Image (cartoon, rainbow, N blue to C red):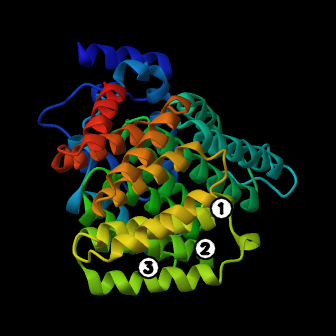
Amino acid sequence: MPRLLAEVFTERLGVPVSPADLGFPQPGTRGPGEEINFPWLLTRTASALTRQTKGDLMLDRHAFQGDEAPSELAAGPELLAAVQPWASTVPEPLPNLAEQGHGRIGMSDVAQIEQVTKVFRNWDNLYGGGLTREAIVGQLKGAAALLDGPYTEQTGRGLFRVVADLSSVAGWASFDAGLHKTAQRYFVLGLHAAKEAGDKALGAHLLNCMSRQMGHLKHPADALELVQLAQYGARNDATATTRAMLHALEARYLAVTGQMREFDRAVGLAEDSYAHADPGTDPDWVQFFDTSEFYATIGICHQIAAASRPGSADTAAAMIEYAISSRPAGRVRSRAFDHIGLARTRLIKGEYEGAATAADTALGLLGELSSSRVTDRLRELLAGTEPHAGNRAIQCLRDRLTAALT
């Protein structure tokens, strides 16, 4: 039956569709790493994007929500083998070049995709990926179809750049909706497109997204490798804000893996880089990393470090509280993460009433979001309260968390 369905979809769509593309497990065939490890060829990138978006839109993802087991993701050496060539490969010559001024596709098309991507990124920040994901994928499908050209050199590189950026938004929305395997595919395809655009900083952003995904799924060693690859590849191209973001993320996974000397180094580099940030020079995809995000990120780093340095919890609480005070009201998902982080920090400090208050604030924001990442963090918070269940305030909080998550 899987083979028969794949044949039907292949005939109707005009592109090869495998049983794995339709979500059927295929024992003894490709492993997770092989699905994202393909040649760094321009034509392969364009066709893979078209195939991925078409296959994605065919499925009723609401029915499959949560069915993509994190164990199906590429990880470890398989994942690193798939992305490491990005740092050393260069853009290929563009096929289907049109004469200047006579291309079917022009910079106006690039600008339109760029504007739509900004809108989708803002929607994702406001409401979470679950409500916007299919619209984003549909737009990416249309944008990927333009990669066949014809266009001028300038337009072609610009088109690959905006397709790579839109892929990052599609991947992030998929990640936020709990579709982890799909998210990883979009991130890797976006990385390939960024390579053809010749935009190393954008490629670093895609690796940053992949790093956050692997960290969320409890693969801190992979997360650290990915962010360090991003730093190396974009060492000559990243703005100060981008460098601060990458150093802060590196610090997080150094704390998780217990590398405290390197943690101190990374935090210092993040602070120094952010002190030199110039938002006017930043691309749209890094503008989320504002003052509130910087303090929240470093605050969580110190919260994690408190496992081996108890005094770090005070620093963490102060930084997260500052992030909360400066966070724009519209960033609902980020505000939820802030209050969950503050609740966990206050648990570490033994401030049980304060932990319950912060967690209640996060629960109050849950109804405004469609984000599996937020619910995952609330589940982690619930697990973290178990050792303190003898406290009345914490037991009441556990009851509220259980009810909300159920």
Q: Position of residue 217 (x, y in %)?
A: 28, 50
- Residue that mark 1 sits on: 287
**Quadrant location of the N terminus in the rendered image:** top left
Left or right: residue 280 versus residue 378 is: right
**Quadrant location of the C terminus in the rendered image:** top left
CA gap, disc 2 and disc 1:
8 Å
- Name which of mark 3 and mark 1 comes first in the sequence: 3
- Residue that mark 3 sits on: 232
Residue drawn 67% across the image and 60% down it? 157
Is the residue under label 1 in contact with that under label 3 (CB below 8 Å)?
no
- Crowding at mark 1 (Cα within 10 Å: few <14, some 14-19, many 20+): some
Q: In which quarter of the image is residue 59?
A: top left
**Residue 241 image label:** 2
Q: Where is residue 388 in the image (x, y as percent from the top left)?
A: 20, 49
Name the amino acid, label 1.
Gln
Name the amino acid, label 3.
Tyr
Which of 388/176 is in front? Answer: 388
Which of 7/230 is in front? Answer: 230
- Name which of mark 2 and mark 3 comes first in the sequence: 3
Which of 205/398 is in front? Answer: 398
Query: What element does badge 1 sit on?
Result: loop
